[in-house]
Image: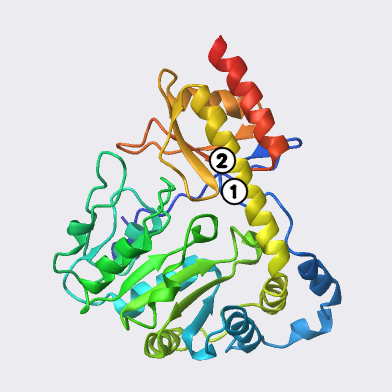
Amino acid sequence: MRNWEQYVRRVVPYTPGEQPNRPGMIKLNTNENPYPPAPGVQQALRELDAGSFRLYPDPAASELIDALADYYGKEQERFFVGVGSDDVIAMAFQTFFNSEKPILFPDISYSFYSVWAELFGIPYRRPALDEKLCLVKKDYFAENGGIIFPNPNAPTGIYMELCEVEEIIARNPDSVVIVDEAYVDFAGPSAMSLVDKYDNLLVVQTFSKSRSMAGMRIGFAYGQPELIRYLNDVKYSFNSYTMNLPSLKLGTAALKDRAYFEETVGKIKATRERVKRELSALGFAFPDSGANFIFASHKSCPAKELFEALKEQNIYVRYFASPRIDNYLRITVGTDEEMDVLLKFLKSYLRE
């Protein structure tokens, strides 16, 4: 080993979903929205002045913050934005999880949580989901240095009712509780409604899924002003210009078309429910998904085999070679036409 290598921080990195680029592919592996962004986003893109790129973007992201505040009917001081929800959550880890006590998050969950904990030297415990892949509330009533969990959970897609979320928050007044709501628009009420009641709650959402903006990397946090001030203090300690100008402009435009947003979310939910019925008829079992994906296991055909067979047909889904979930496929809900191709292949393959 060379001398400098002994000082390298070594972590096991997050493994992102495969990003193939093949003609005619059906990409159902990274939970992207199959529909384009709102028409106003395309208009805003055409109106962008390339000459403005020579200037730094607004470090306070005021235009986007104002648009979020207007959309949700809340004060600007309650919002924090970043380069995707990953950036926002990583910032929250550095800001709030500095106790010697372990933070808590589920064993089957977004795998970036453990990566950040390792990178930032944060102790953590991962309470196991139960046999139905549901979070066990009482596991989060123990002493801790903070809590984070997705709702709906990923990769299971299970949505926890708001009353249960509130119980976890209420039982942990001395810890910051982060509810990661990347998929909440496809499920039920957001924990944003609880923020007025709890000063230790931070809710994180993204434009990547329901708003069709994964390529722009826009995420935000919502909490009481004191939490947001602490986040901004950490942000301005190392990089004030976290969001680029196109993301600020296009993100703002995305929030202005509520009708289009509701229409596309409704289409995805309708397709999801239809595909659930058809997968069930083919012998698949899955938790009841509240997300834009289905976490499915077949009673007789191994998931790894199906994953490879689908890939040969230019259909990409997500396979996790991890304990307890290595016989599941996470299938993003695409357009009706894309899902019909998937179902047609599955029917043929499972008959052989």
From this viewpoint, is residue 144 visible? yes
Does the CB distance between marks 2 and 1 fall below 8 Å?
A: yes
Q: Quadrant of residue 7?
A: bottom left
Q: Residue at x 59, y 61 (%)?
A: 208
Looking at the image, the residue that sits furthest to the left is: 143
From this viewpoint, is residue 28 visible? no
Q: Is residue 234 left or right of residue 344?
A: left
Q: Is residue 249 left or right of residue 326?
A: right
Q: Residue at x 34, y 80 (%)?
A: 95
Q: Position of residue 105 (x, y in %)?
A: 28, 59
Q: Residue at x 31, y 47 (%)?
A: 134
Q: Position of residue 288 (x, y in %)?
A: 43, 42
Residue linked to disc 2: 273
In the image, residue 18 sits, relative to residue 9, either above or below, namely: above
The amino acid at mark 2 is: Glu
Q: Quadrant of residue 217?
A: bottom right
Q: Position of residue 155 (x, y in %)?
A: 43, 47
Disc tally is: 2
Quadrant of image for the N terminus:
bottom left
The amino acid at mark 1 is: Lys
Q: Residue at x 66, y 61 (%)?
A: 262
Tell me the distance, in whole angstroms, between the alpha carbons under discs 2 and 1.
Answer: 6 Å
In front of the other: 343 or 105:
343
In front of the other: 233 or 144:
144
The kind of secondary structure element at disc 2 is: helix
Residue linked to disc 1: 269
In the image, residue 301 sits, relative to residue 158, either above or below, namely: above
